[in-house]
Image: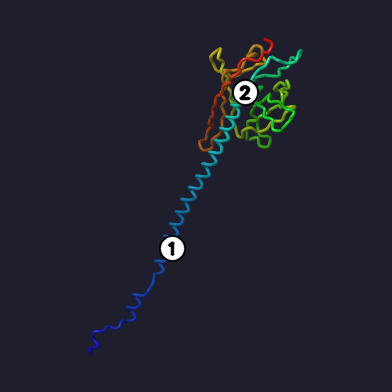
Amino acid sequence: MSTFGHVVPTLSSRTARQRGLSLIEILVAVAMMTMMTASVYASFSTTAQSMRSAEKIQQKYAVLRNCLARMGTEISLAYLSHNRPAGEDRHFTLFEGRDQFNSDSLTFSAFAHIRMRKDANESDQSVIQYFLAKDPNDANRTHLFKRETRRLMGDVPEKMEEWWPAYVFCEDIKSFDVKYWDNKRIEWRDEWRTMKQDMQPNRLPERVKITFGVWDADLGKEVKYVTQTLIPMQERIDFSR
C-alpha cells in the first residue's frame, strides 16, 4: 500500500482551525454589547421618567379639579335668610364677594357644613370663607385658604380670623378670580355684596364663575382653570311673609 495518499496535518493547519477570537474581535463585541445595553437602559429610563412626569401632572390636575368641584358644590348651597332674633342687627347669613384684582375673597353662608362626630355641637349651616394668601413658611408660594365656622355666628368677614383658623385648601394658586352673574342686569359682576344696601342686599347671583391661575413651569406661563356653578336659592328666606 502506498503511503502517498494520506496527508499528515501539520501544526500550522491545526492551529488555524482551532484558534478562537482575537483580542480586537472581543473588544468590538464587548463595545457592541455595551452600546446595546446603554441604548435599552436609556429607553427604559426615558419611559420611566415620562411616566413619573405624567403621573405628577395628572395628580396636580386631579387636585385642582377636586378643589374646583368642592368649591362649586359649597357655593351652590349658599343661601340668605331674613329670619333672626328680635332686635338683632348682625348679618347671620351673607354673601360677600370682594374684588381685589387677582386675589379675590368670598365669604358666604351655606347649608354645607359636614358634622364629623355624632352629637357634635355644630350645625349644617355655616359661614365659609375663601381667600388667597402667602405661605407662612415660604413667601414665594401662594395658596388658596379656607375658613369655616361650625354654626352661624353673625361674624363679619373681617372678624372671622379671630375665632376660626384657616387651612390650605389648594396649594400653589397664583391668582383667584370670582365673577357673579347678575340676571337682572344681564352681566358679570366683579363684586357681590349682600351686606351693603347699595349693592345686592336681598338676593344671590344666579351663577358664579371661579378661576384659578396656576403657574406651569413647562409652559413658562400662568394657566387658567375655570368652572361655573349655579345657585338655586337666589332669593332670601323670609318666614314672615
Q: Quadrant of residue 124?
A: top right
Q: Residue at x 39, y 70 (%)?
A: 22
Regarding mark 2 in the picture, which secondary structure is present there? loop
Residue 20 drawn at (x, y percent): 39, 72
**Residue located beneath label 2 in the image:** 77
Camera-nearest residue between 7 and 85: 85
**Residue located beneath label 1 in the image:** 30
Q: Quadrant of residue 136?
A: top right
Residue 60 drawn at (x, y percent): 56, 37
Q: Looking at the image, do the residues carrying marks 1 and 2 touch, with CB atoms under 8 Å apart?
A: no
Under mark 2, the amino acid is Leu
Under mark 1, the amino acid is Val
Residue 43 drawn at (x, y percent): 46, 50
Instruction: Give the crowd class for mark 1: few <14, some 14-19, many >=20 residues within 10 Å.
Output: few
Camera-nearest residue between 182 and 73: 73
Mark on residue 89?
none
Q: Residue at x 59, y 18 (%)?
A: 205
Q: Quadrant of residue 165?
A: top right
Of all residues, the one furthest to the bottom in this rendering is 1
Q: Is residue 31 above or below residue 59?
A: below
Q: Is residue 201 above or below residue 145?
A: above
Regarding mark 1 in the picture, which secondary structure is present there? helix
